[in-house]
Image (spheres, rainbow, N blue to C red):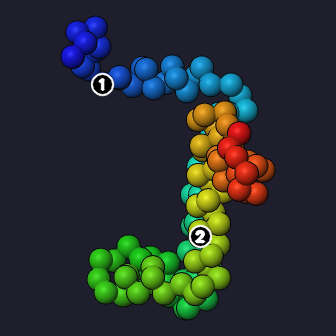
Amino acid sequence: MDENISKELPGVETLVQSIADLPDHNFTAIVIGVLLWLVGGNIVGYLSLKRRGIPFWQVMVPDLNAFKAVFGMNIIEWLIIIALAVISLSLIYWGCTGDLPPLLVENSIRGLQYK
C-alpha cells in the first residue's frame, strides 16, 4: 500500500472548497436538480394525498395508515415521480461531472457508440 495516500476522510472544508470551485453552470444544475426533486416530489405527494382525502400530516404518524398514504399513489403519480427522479439525477450528474449522462447522448440512444 502506498504510504503517501492519506487515510483521513476529507473534512467539511474540502467539501465546501470543492463546491466553491465548481463553474457556475455546474453549480446551477446541481441546485436545480435538488430543488426539482424536493419540490416536485412534495407537490406530487401532496396532490396524491389531497386526491384521496388523506390529511397531509397523517404521513408523519407511524402506523399502517401512513404506509397506505405513501404507497397508495396511482400509476400517473408513480410515472411523474420516476420522471422527476430521472431528470433530477441527470441534472445532478451533469453538474458534478460536466458531461451528459450516457443515456442522453444522441449516439448512445441510437445504439451506435458512446461519446
**Residue occupying the point 65% across, 40% down:** 94
Distance Cα–Cα, label 1 vs label 2:
34 Å
Which numbered disc flags the more N-terminal residue, 1 or 2? 1
Quick one: which residue is furthest to the top in this view?
Answer: 4
Q: Is residue 55 left or right of residue 66?
A: right
Circles 1 and 2, Cβ within 8 Å, touching? The answer is no
Classify residue 20 by image quadrant.
top right
Secondary-structure class at tag 2: helix
Q: Nearer the viewer, residue 102 or 25?
A: 102
Res. 43 in view: no
Residue extending furthest toward the front: 112
Task: Evaluate whether residue 25 shows in this view.
Answer: yes
Residue 31: which disc?
none
Element marked by disc 1: loop
| Residue 72 location (% of width, % of height) | 48, 87
- Of all residues, the one furthest to the bottom in this rendering is 53
Looking at the rendered structure, which numbered label has been put on residue 9? Answer: 1
Q: Residue at x 51, y 19 (%)?
A: 17
**Relative to 89, 28 lies left or right:** right
Residue 5 falls left or right of residue 26: left
Query: Which of the pair 21/50 is nearer the observer?
Result: 21
Query: Of the numbered discs in the image, which one, if any, rests on residue 81?
Result: 2
Q: Residue at x 73, y 32 (%)?
A: 25
> For this rendering, which residue is in front, 76 or 108?
108
Q: Is residue 52 above or below residue 27?
A: below
What amino acid is labelled 2 in the image?
A: Ile
Quarter of the picture containing the N terminus is: top left
